[in-house]
Amino acid sequence: MNRWLVILVDLVFVLFFAAAGRESHESGSALALVLVIAWPFVVALAAGHALVALRRWSPAPVWPSGVTVLAVTYLLGMSLRFVQGRGLAPGFLVVSLIFLTVTLLGWRASIAFVERRTAAQEASEKSGARS
């Protein structure tokens, strides 16, 4: 899968995460506030993808790429959020980890499942055609 497409999908989920947080807890200028909430996680996401690229891993697999991107996005994102002076309530830490895990790993797992299933069907059709 194209590296830029993987980054774009991850970015969409991180921005959705920030937008959902703004919608649930804060009011104000929508775009400006989403960017204030999102920037630590966007920077962390970029760092995670940079690490994956430096390791020369394909960006789409759950392991090790997805787990690396998730870990860097969550840990560095929370660190930057703390430095920014924004809260790190225990509930936020848990909900954020769950959301980022489900989204950043979930779409990768779904793609892998579909690819494996398609390959298995193609192999079955080839072996059936030979019989």
Image (spheres, rainbow, N blue to C red):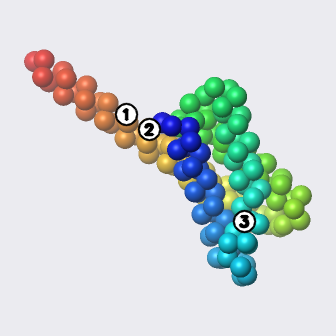
How far across and how far down the image is residue 35, in percent? 72, 65
How far across and how far down the image is residue 118, in percent? 31, 35
**Disc 1 residue crowd, few under 14, some 14–19, many 20+, Cα 10 Å:** few
Mark before the other along the chain sequence, 1 or 3: 3
Contact, mark 2 vs mark 3 (Cβ under 8 Å): no
Contact, mark 1 vs mark 3 (Cβ under 8 Å): no
Q: Quadrant of the C terminus?
A: top left
Mark before the other along the chain sequence, 2 or 3: 3
As measured in the structure, the alpha-carbon distance from the residue carrying label 1 to the one carrying label 2 is 6 Å
Q: Is residue 101 visible?
A: yes
Mark 2 residue element:
helix
Q: Residue at x 51, y 37 (%)?
A: 2
**Disc 3 residue crowd, few under 14, some 14–19, many 20+, Cα 10 Å:** some
As measured in the structure, the alpha-carbon distance from the residue carrying label 2 to the one carrying label 3 is 31 Å
Which residue appears farthest toward the top when viewing the image? 130
Tell which of 19 and 106 is nearer to you: 19
Q: Amino acid at mark 1?
A: Arg
Find residue 35 and name its label: 3
Which residue appears farthest toward the left when viewing the image? 131
Which residue has dot 1 on it? Answer: 116
Along the horizontal axis of the image, is 50 left or right of 3?
A: right
Q: Amino acid at mark 2?
A: Ala
Contact, mark 1 vs mark 2 (Cβ under 8 Å): yes
Which residue has dot 2 on it? Answer: 112
Q: Residue at x 60, y 40 (%)?
A: 66
Q: Is residue 63 visible?
A: no
Mark 3 residue element:
helix
Along the horizontal axis of the image, is 52 left or right of 126?
A: right
Along the horizontal axis of the image, is 23 left or right of 103?
A: right
How far across and how far down the image is residue 41, in percent? 72, 54
Along the horizontal axis of the image, is 107 left or right of 41?
A: left
> Of the residues tagged 2 and 3, which is closer to the observer?
3
